[in-house]
Image (tube, coloured by chain):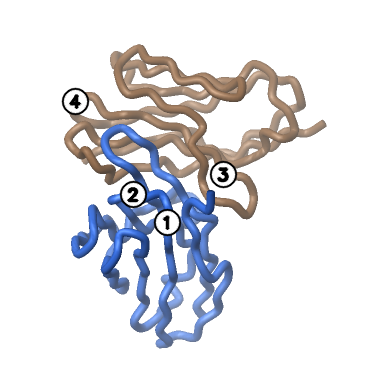
Chain colours: A brown, B blue
C-alpha cells in the first residue's frame, strides 16, 4: 500500500541555519503530497502542498518540490528561526482516493536554538 | 472561524470505562476522520466518514466506534478502554477534491 518515510529526529539547529527534512513515498500513480506542521499542544496545520510532478509548494519560507523520478518531497528552509521549532509531518493523499485516506510519516521534531 | 473543535482536551480513564470524544466542524465539510498519534508512528487513521450516515474503517479501528448523524459532528466512542488506547486523538475534516485536512487541537487520553 501507499506509505511515507521521513527522516527521524530530533533535528537540532542554530538560528539562521539551513533546514532539510527528507521525505520519500511509495504510491501508485500521482498522489498529492503535503507537509504539515504541529506546534506544541496544537493540532496539525497545513504548511504546503503539491499535487503533480515538478510542482513546488511554498509557504513561510519553506519549500518542497514534488519529484516523481525520486519519489521524494523534501522540505527545505534557508534560514530557520526559533519559532520554527515544531514537529513536521510529510503526508500523501492517494491518487485513487478523492476524499483522503491520508498516509502520514512518523514526524520529524525540529529544535532551533538561539 | 472555529474550524474543528474537539472536547475534552485531556481525559484519564480506568481500564474498562467507556467515553466519547467529541468533534464538531463548522466548515460544512463532508469528510471527517479520526486519527491517533503515537510516538514514532505518526498519525494512524481510525475511522472516517464521507457524509452523514456514512462511516468506514481506517487502519486501526478495533476498540472504537463512530457514527455520523449530522454533517457537523463526528463523535468517537471507546466502549471499554484499554491501556493500549493511551494516545493523542485528532479529528480532521476536509472539503472535496484536493483540499487539505483541517485538524482539531487534539484530545490527550490516558488509560490506567
Question: In the picture, which quadrant includes the C terminus of chain A?
Answer: top right
State how far apart marks 3 and 1 are (Cα). Answer: 19 Å
Secondary structure of the residue carrying numbered label 2: loop
Q: Is residue A37 above or below residue B112?
A: above
Which chain is mark 2 on?
B
Please state which of the two labelled residues, at mark 3 or mark 1, is closer to the viewer: 1
Crowd rating for badge 3 (residues with CA inside 10 Å; few <14, some 14–19, many 20+): some
Q: Are marks 3 and 2 on the same chain?
A: no
Residue placed under numbered mark 4 in the picture: A29
Is the C-beta separation of discs 3 and 1 under 8 Å? no
Residue hosting label 3 = A38
Which mark lies nearer to you, 2 or 4? Answer: 2
Give the number of callouts.
4
Relative depth, front residue between B95 and A1: B95
Residues at marks 2 and 1 touching, judged by CB atoms closer than 8 Å: yes
Q: Quadrant of residue B60?
A: bottom left
Chain to which mark 3 belongs: A
> Badge 1 sits on which subunit?
B
Amino acid at each position: 500500500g501507499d506509505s511515507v518515510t521521513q527522516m527521524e529526529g530530533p533535528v537540532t539547529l542554530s538560528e539562521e541555519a539551513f533546514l532539510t527534512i527528507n521525505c520519500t513515498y511509495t504510491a501508485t500513480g500521482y498522489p498529492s503530497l503535503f507537509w504539515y506542521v504541529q506546534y506544541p499542544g496544537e493540532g496539525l496545520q497545513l504548511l504546503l502542498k503539491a499535487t503533480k510532478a515538478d510542482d513546488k509548494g511554498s509557504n513561510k519560507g519553506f519549500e518542497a518540490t514534488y519529484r516523481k523520478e525520486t519519489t521524494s518531497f523534501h522540505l527545505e528552509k534557508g534560514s530557520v528561526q526559533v519559532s520554527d521549532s515544531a514537529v513536521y509531518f510529510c503526508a500523501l493523499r492517494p491518487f485513487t482516493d478523492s476524499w483522503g485516506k491520508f498516509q502520514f510519516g512518523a514526524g520529524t521534531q525540529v529544535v532551533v536554538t538561539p | 472561524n472555529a474550524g474543528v473543535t474537539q472536547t475534552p482536551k485531556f481525559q484519564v480513564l480506568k481500564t474498562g470505562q467507556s467515553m466519547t470524544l467529541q468533534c464538531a466542524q463548522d466548515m460544512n465539510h463532508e469528510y471527517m476522520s479520526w486519527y491517533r498519534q503515537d510516538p514514532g508512528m505518526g498519525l494512524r487513521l481510525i475511522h472516517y466518514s464521507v457524509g452523514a450516515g456514512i462511516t468506514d474503517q481506517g487502519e486501526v479501528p478495533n476498540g472504537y466506534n463512530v457514527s455520523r448523524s449530522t454533517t457537523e459532528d463526528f463523535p468517537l466512542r471507546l466502549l471499554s478502554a484499554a491501556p493500549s488506547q493511551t494516545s493523542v486523538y485528532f479529528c480532521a475534516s476536509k472539503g472535496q477534491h484536493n483540499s487539505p485536512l483541517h485538524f482539531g487541537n487534539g484530545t490527550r487520553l490516558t488509560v490506567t
